Image (cartoon, rainbow, N blue to C red):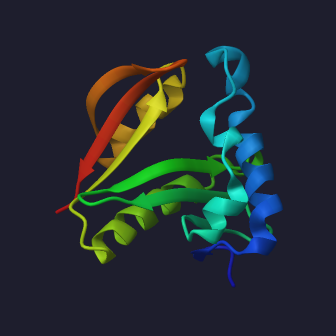
Amino acid sequence: MTSEEIRPATAADVPAVRSVTDAAYQPYIERVGVVPQPMEADHAADVAAGKVFVTGDPVVGLVVVEERADHLFLDSIAVRPDAHGTGVGRRLLHFVDARARALGLPEVRLYTNAMMWENQKIYPKYGYEVVERRIDGPYDRVHYRKRLR
């Protein structure tokens, strides 16, 4: 596998999935005031369910996606901090679009915490539009969608 490829995660990848997710979301704990939901995910179950796709050897980035009736839900995207700015996130977002199209789904949806303002600058650059801002329990979330053409 080249470092550019994105592949389904396997059980052997679970420790790397946990490590990359924790490294990506750890900086937000203090700012948000709670542990970001991706850090509390059952990574082994998500991998076993075929929801996790990884890139890099060793793993430097990943997405967790879930097929829904009318869209692909991007549950989490994580890039190891030392790989920021290298195009990993861009490749992962393009992969999510391609995955949705392959599944015949017309759009991708995601949300991010309102305190993760970096993300609110990134997603619109990739065609995402804000749908709403909503409080979900302890989380103040900005919901996005991207309609695929």
Q: Give me the residue at 49% from left, 48% from top.
A: 75
| Relative vertical location of residue 103 with respect to residue 79 in this rendering, above or below | below
Dividing the picture into quadrants, the one containing residue 103 is bottom left
Q: Which residue is nearer to you in this view: 87 or 21?
A: 21
- Residue 145 position within the rendered picture, expressed as x and y whole percent measured from the top left: 28, 44
- Residue 19 position within the rendered picture, expressed as x and y whole percent measured from the top left: 80, 51
| Relative vertical location of residue 144 with respect to residue 75 in this rendering, above or below | above
Dividing the picture into quadrants, the one containing residue 87 is bottom right
Quarter the C terminus occupies: bottom left
Q: Is residue 53 left or right of residue 43?
A: left
Using the rendered image of the protein, determine whether residue 149 is visible from the camera's viewpoint: yes
Q: Give me the residue at 63% from left, 49% from top.
A: 78
Q: Which residue is nearer to you in this view: 135 or 92?
A: 135
- Residue 68 position within the rendered picture, expressed as x and y whole percent measured from the top left: 33, 59
| Relative vertical location of residue 26 with respect to residue 87 in this rendering, above or below | above
- Residue 49 position within the rendered picture, expressed as x and y whole percent measured from the top left: 57, 68
Q: Give me the residue at 71% from left, 52% from top.
A: 83
Q: Which residue is nearer to you in this view: 121 or 95?
A: 95
Dividing the picture into quadrants, the one containing residue 5 is bottom right
**How many badges with numbers are in the image?**
0
Quarter the N terminus occupies: bottom right
Judged from this view, the residue extending furthest toward the bottom is 1
Q: Give me the residue at 42% from left, 62% from top.
A: 96
Q: Is residue 118 left or right of residue 106?
A: right
Using the rendered image of the protein, determine whether residue 128 is visible from the camera's viewpoint: no
